[in-house]
Image (spheres, rainbow, N blue to C red):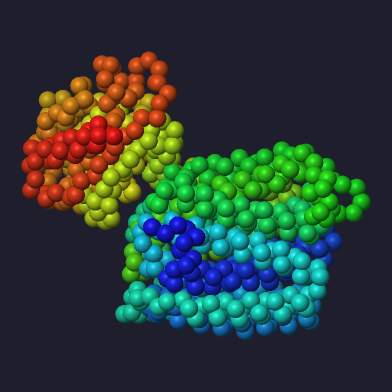
C-alpha cells in the first residue's frame, strides 16, 4: 500500500486533493479576512461575538437548506463533472466577494459568505463519497487523514493569508480570492471520472420528504448513524472554538489580530498533524479505539483553558512577535492546550469518517454524506445560537469553552454507551499497545457484510477482546450464563449485546432462549461468535467441539469463519496455574498470533470445524518454533 503522502502521486487522489485543498483555502482566505474585520471593527466583546457568529451561522445555513438536492445530484451524475461546475461557480462568487471588499459593505460581504456556503454545500457530498470509489478499503484511513490534513493546512494558510492581507491591503485580498478560485478550477480538470452511483435516481424536490428519505438512509446501519451524530458533535465543538478565538485572543490573551491568526493556525495545524498520527496508529485499518481517546483529550485540554490565570498586558495589544518573545508560562499553556485539542480532535474525527465510508451503502453514499452535512449544519448553527445566547447572558469566552468541554464529555459518553464497539476498541487498542503484541493473519477472510458465525478456541477470559481486534465488524459473543449474570458485570455484557448460554442440565430455558437470540442476530445480518468447546481450556489444548454449532447452522445456514488464537495460554487471563487472574500479572509484551481462516460451508460438522481450528493452531505453533 502507498503511504499517506504517496497517494498524492496517484491520479485517482492527487488532483482531487488539491482541488479540495484550494477550495478550503479560499473559504478561509475570504471568511477569516471577514471575521477579523468584524472582530476589530467592533467596540465591545459582545458586539464582536454577535457579528462573528451571525456571519458564520449564515455560512453554514445553506448546508441545511440545499444538502438534500446536493446529495441527489452527486449520486445521479458523474462526480468529476459536478466538481468542475462547482469550481466555475466559485470563480463567480469570489468576483462578487472582491466587489464587496472594494465597496466596504459588511452586509454585502456576509451575503457573499452565504453564497460560499451554497458552493460548499454542493461540493460536500462529493468530498467524502468519492474517496471509497477511488481508494482501496485499506487506504480509506490514509485518504481521510490526508483530506483532514489538507483541509486544516488550508485553514492554516488561508487564516494567515486572510489575516495578513486584510490588515495590509483589502484590495490585494480581493484579487487573491479570485486567483485561488481560478486555480481550483484548473486542478479540478484533472480529477478522473468515477462510476455514477445511481443513474436511475428520480429527483425528489420536496424538501421535507427528502429529509425523511435521507434520515432513513442514515439509519440503515446503526453504527453509521451514530457516527454521523458523533461527527456533527465534533463540528459543534470545533465551531465554538474557531468562532470564539478572535474574542479569546483580544480579551484574554491581550493579542492583536496577528496573535489570533497564530493561535488559529496552531489549532488548525495540530488537527492536520494529528490526522497523520492517527493514520499511523491505525496501522492501515479503521481503529475505532482512538475515538474515545480523542474525545477524552478534547474535554481535558479545553477545560484546562478555563483554569489558566490570565494576565492581560498593560497598554497596546501584543503582536505575534512579542507574544513569542515574552511568552509566559500561562501563554505557553494556552498554546499547548490548543495544539492538543486539535491532535485529540483528529483522533476522534478521522476514524468516524472512514467508518461511514466503509459501512455506508455505496448506492447512496453521497446522500448519506448530504445527511451528514445537514446534521453538521444543524449542530454548527446550534453552536452559533448557544454562543450568542451565552454572550447575551454575560458569560465570557473561557466560560463558554468550559461549558462546551463539559458537554463534550456528556455527549461522547452517551454515544459510546449506545455504540459500545468504540469503548471495546479503545480497551483493545490499549491492550495491543501495552500488554500484548497481536499479529493478525487473514482478517480479510471475514465477509464485509451479511450474516457470519465465527468459531474459535477458548483459551482465556479476554478471548473476546482478541477476536474483536481481528473483526472490524460489530460482533455478538455467546458466553457462559454463569459469568453473564454476575451482578457487577451484567450491565457491561448487556451493553456489549452478549448472548448468555447454558447447558440443558443447568438451565434449559436459558439454552433455548440463547439459540433464539443467535438466530435473530443472524437474520439481521450480524456477526456472531461462539466458542464450541463450551468452556475455557484447563490444559492449553483444544477440547472437542460440541454439537450446538451444528444446530445453529441447521437453522441458519450461513458462512462459518474459523479463528485460532495462539500465545494466550500461560497469560495472566488463562488457567495455566489452575485459576485465572490469580496473583499479580507479569510485565511482558506477550505475542499473540490470531489466524482467521477462509469461510467454511454451513454444512460443516463440529468435528470438521474443530479439525480446521486445530490445524491453524498447529501452523502458528510451528511458525513460532521456527523463529
Can you say whether 474 is above or below 627 in the image? below
The spot of residue 311 in percent (x, y) is 83, 42
Q: Name which quarter of the figure residue 161 lies in.
A: bottom right
Q: Nearer the viewer, residue 522 or 215?
A: 522
Observer able to see residue 15: yes
Residue located 61% across and 40% down the image: 300
* Quadrant assignment for the C terminus: top left
On the image, the x and y values in percent for residue 296 come to 54, 41
Residue at coordinates 57% horizontally, 53% vertically from top-left? 273
Count up the numbered dots: 0
Q: Residue at the right extreme?
A: 315
Decide if residue 111 is in sight here. Answer: no
Where 483 falls versus 338 (above or below)?
Answer: above
Q: Quadrant of residue 435?
A: top left
Please tell me which residue lies in front, 293 or 50. Answer: 293
Q: Which residue sits at x=82%, y=48%?
A: 325
Quadrant position of residue 200: bottom left
Name the spot of residue 485 as percent of width and height, x first. Answer: 29, 28
Residue 62 image offset from top left, x and y in percent: 56, 72
- The residue depicted at 22 percent of the width and 41 percent of the height is 563
In this image, 5 relative to 624: left or right? right
Amino acid at each position: 500500500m502507498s503511504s499517506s503522502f504517496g497517494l498524492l502521486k496517484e491520479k485517482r487522489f492527487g488532483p482531487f486533493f488539491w482541488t479540495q485543498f484550494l477550495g478550503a483555502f479560499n473559504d478561509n482566505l475570504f471568511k477569516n479576512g471577514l471575521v477579523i474585520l468584524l472582530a476589530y471593527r467592533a467596540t465591545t466583546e459582545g458586539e464582536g461575538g454577535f457579528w462573528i457568529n451571525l456571519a458564520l451561522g449564515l455560512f453554514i445555513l445553506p448546508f441545511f437548506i440545499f444538502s438534500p438536492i446536493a446529495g441527489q445530484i452527486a449520486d445521479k451524475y458523474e462526480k468529476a463533472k459536478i466538481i468542475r461546475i462547482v469550481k466555475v461557480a466559485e470563480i463567480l462568487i469570489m468576483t462578487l466577494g472582491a466587489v464587496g471588499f472594494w465597496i466596504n459593505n459588511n452586509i454585502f460581504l456576509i451575503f457573499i459568505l452565504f453564497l460560499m456556503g451554497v458552493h460548499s454545500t454542493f461540493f460536500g457530498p462529493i468530498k467524502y463519497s468519492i474517496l471509497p470509489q477511488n481508494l482501496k478499503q485499506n487506504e480509506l484511513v490514509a485518504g481521510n487523514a490526508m483530506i483532514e490534513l489538507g483541509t486544516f493546512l488550508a485553514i492554516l494558510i488561508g487564516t494567515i493569508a486572510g489575516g495578513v492581507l486584510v490588515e495590509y491591503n483589502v484590495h490585494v485580498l480581493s484579487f487573491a480570492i479570485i486567483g485561488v478560485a481560478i486555480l481550483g478550477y484548473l486542478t479540478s480538470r484533472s480529477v478522473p471520472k468515477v462510476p455514477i452511483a445511481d443513474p436511475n435516481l428520480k429527483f425528489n424536490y420536496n424538501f421535507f420528504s427528502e429529509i425523511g428519505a435521507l434520515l432513513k438512509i442514515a439509519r440503515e446501519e446503526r453504527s453509521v448513524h451514530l457516527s454521523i451524530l458523533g461527527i456533527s458533535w465534533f463540528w459543534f465543538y470545533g465551531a465554538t472554538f474557531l468562532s470564539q478565538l478572535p474574542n479569546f485572543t483580544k480579551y484574554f490573551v491581550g493579542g492583536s489580530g496577528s496573535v489570533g491568526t497564530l493561535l488559529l493556525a496552531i489549532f488548525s495545524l495540530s488537527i492536520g498533524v494529528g490526522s497523520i498520527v492517527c493514520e499511523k496508529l491505525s496501522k492501515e485499518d479503521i481503529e475505532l479505539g482512538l475515538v474515545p481517546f480523542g474525545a477524552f483529550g478534547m474535554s481535558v485540554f479545553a477545560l484546562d483553558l478555563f483554569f489558566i490565570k490570565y494576565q492581560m498586558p498593560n497598554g497596546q495589544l501584543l503582536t505575534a512577535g512579542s507574544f513569542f518573545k515574552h511568552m509566559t508560562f500561562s501563554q505557553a499553556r494556552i498554546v499547548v492546550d490548543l495544539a492538543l485539542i486539535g491532535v485529540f480532535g483528529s483522533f476522534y474525527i478521522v476514524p468516524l469518517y472512514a467508518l461511514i465510508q466503509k459501512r455506508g451503502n455505496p448506492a447512496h453514499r453521497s446522500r448519506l454524506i448530504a445527511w451528514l452535512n445537514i446534521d453538521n449544519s444543524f449542530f454548527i448553527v446550534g453552536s452559533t445560537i448557544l454562543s450568542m445566547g451565552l454572550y447575551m447572558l454575560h458569560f465570557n469566552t473561557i466560560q463558554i469553552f468550559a461549558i462546551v468541554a463539559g458537554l463534550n464529555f456528556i455527549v461522547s459518553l452517551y454515544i459510546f454507551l449506545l455504540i459500545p464497539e468504540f469503548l471495546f476498541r479503545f480497551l483493545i487498542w490499549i491492550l495491543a499497545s501495552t500488554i500484548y503484541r497481536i499479529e493478525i493473519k487473514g482478517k480479510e477472510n471475514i465477509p464485509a457484510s451479511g450474516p457470519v458465525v465465527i468459531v474459535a478456541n477458548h483459551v482465556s477470559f479476554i478471548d473476546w477482546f482478541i477476536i474483536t481486534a481481528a473483526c472490524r465488524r460489530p460482533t455478538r459473543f455467546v458466553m457462559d450464563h454463569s459469568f453473564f449474570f454476575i451482578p457487577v458485570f451484567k450491565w457491561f455484557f448487556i451493553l456489549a449485546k452478549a448472548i448468555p448460554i447454558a447447558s440443558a442440565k443447568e438451565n434449559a430455558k436459558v439454552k433455548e432462549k440463547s439459540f433464539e437470540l443467535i438466530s435473530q442476530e443472524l437474520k439481521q445480518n450480524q456477526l456472531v461468535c461462539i466458542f464450541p468447546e463450551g468452556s475455557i481450556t484447563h490444559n492449553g489444548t483444544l477440547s472437542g467441539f460440541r454439537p450446538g454449532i451444528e444446530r445453529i447452522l441447521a437453522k441458519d445456514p450461513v458462512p462459518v469463519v474459523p479463528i485460532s488464537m495462539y500465545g494466550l495460554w500461560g497469560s495472566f487471563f488463562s488457567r495455566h496455574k489452575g485459576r485465572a487472574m490469580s496473583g499479580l500479572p507479569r510485565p511482558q509484551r506477550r505475542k499473540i498470533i490470531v489466524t482467521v481462516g477462509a469461510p467454511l460451508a454451513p454444512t460443516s460438522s463440529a468435528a470438521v470445524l474443530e479439525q480446521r481450528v486445530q490445524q491453524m493452531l498447529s501452523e502458528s505453533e510451528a511458525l513460532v518454533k521456527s523463529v
